[in-house]
Amino acid sequence: MNTIKLLALFTTLTTSIFSADFNYLGTKQPYNVKEISTAPTPNGYKPFFVNHLGRHGSRHLSSPKYDVSLYELLSIAEKEKAITPEGLKLKNSIAQLMEIEKGNYGLLTDVGVKEQKEIAKRFYENNKDIFGKDVIASSTYVERAQQSRDAFLEELGEYTPNINFKVSTNSKKDILLRFFDLSPEYEEFSENGNWKKELNTYSKSKNFNNEVLNQLFSKEFIKKLENGEFKLKDSKGKVVLKNPTDAVRNLYDLYIIQASIGKNLGFGDFFSEEQLKWYEEVDNLSDFYEKGPGKNGEDIATNIALPLLENFIVTSDEAIKNQNISANLRFAHAETTIPFITLLDINGYSAKEDNMEKVYEKWLGRDISGMSTNIQWIFYKNDKNDVLVKILHNEKDAELPIATTMKPYYKWDDVKNFYTSKLK
């Protein structure tokens, strides 16, 4: 695969050079699982199949948006002699970022490649008994998902013959991995749901705009920004910076991508810890209500993932029956993993919450669906063909609301019945 060769070269030529601690990154949090410690396999059982869903790895900015608009604003201020020394420092940092991003927008970074390779290595080491049969690997049509799949398979191919790999890319009409694109009802909920108006109000309950912008611009220039004198656009012509809130939010979005790129460009220097925590909370609320558990009585954000849950059940049954497949690997997006994880009802992640003030205390997008997040259903059997399943979330044992005497192992029939009831 040419893509795999390119990824290997990219990984060789670039190294992760950041050492600073990046916090409050929300779902842009790079994968941070270093060691895996799971419960021992029950006596007499061996793994024979894994059903897997993974989010793509750490990536570059999705498109020229936050960087180009903020750079343009700083350039205007410089021309008007309304920029501070700190503002000039930020302008130079954004110029460095834009140079890094040139030709790379939306693609996996070397950090993301490394994440996928390390997951694949542990995947093999922890499940050696399953290999020797087919490995089915699919991804969405988006290039970073394909790159994630290919990086995973390149590493896996170091340990098991890739002659067994059956690789595919889904079309744009993808009911299994991009279900969020195919529901007009969900699109309406995402754009105009009541949660959005409430979040907009809640996000205005704290205002750090002047504290951040006073470091960068003169007060007169900030007043122009407040008066709506600027309408700065992204590469597609959409206005993405028109007021102080946009400017500060765009800067936060540059901050949270640094760890994924693997370079500290100093964007966090303009925020206090309290401010970073607040902006993460606002993003966290958006993920919770738009993609996750949401409010009581609102289920559309997760029900759109039911076809994927059904596919997991069907493909698991087929693997149990036919014994001809080692693993089914899927590579997608946060918009895929968050609804799916919510549907699975693991670790209490599915609890709904009407009060926005309480969400951040108990549901963190960075832990639930950061970069390279993955779900693995690992199947085991004994000589009597009794089948158990264990679910891993980010390679750690997950707890299900199902009775078992062997936690975190559950009888497949019990798990199947539990999830089949959700389909109804």
Image: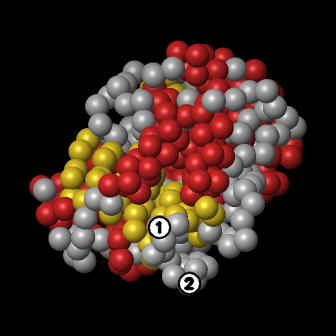
Is residue 341 visible to us here? no
Q: Is residue 256 left or right of residue 72?
A: right
Q: Residue at x 49, y 60 (%)?
A: 376
Q: Residue at x 63, y 30 (%)?
A: 424
Q: Is residue 347 left or right of residue 237?
A: right
In whole angstroms, how far apart are the C-alphas of marks 1 and 2? 14 Å
- Residue 43 is tagged as 2
Q: Residue at x 19, y 62 (%)?
A: 164
Identify the image quadrant of residue 368: bottom right
- Residue 335 is tagged as none
User: Do the numbered discs 1 and 2 sit on residues whose CB atoms are within 8 Å?
Assistant: no
Q: Amino acid at mark 1?
A: Asn
Above/below status of 244 relative to 184: below
Please rate how many residues cluster around mark 2, counting C-alpha atoms within 10 Å: few if below 14, some from 14 to 19, many from 20: few
Going by the picture, which residue comes out furthest to the front?
384
Q: Amino acid at mark 2?
A: Asn
Determine the secondary structure under disc 2. loop
Quadrant location of the N terminus? Answer: bottom left
Q: Position of residue 385 (x, y in %)?
A: 47, 67
Is residue 297 visible to us here? yes
Q: Position of residue 8 (x, y in %)?
A: 21, 67
Question: Which one is in front in this view, the residue at disc 1 or the one at disc 2?
Answer: 1
Please rate how many residues cluster around mark 1, counting C-alpha atoms within 10 Å: few if below 14, some from 14 to 19, many from 20: few
Q: Position of residue 421 (x, y in %)?
A: 65, 38
322 or 278, which lies in front? 322
Report the residue marked by disc 1. Answer: 385
131 or 60, which lies in front? 131
Determine the secondary structure under disc 1. loop
275 or 367, which lies in front? 367
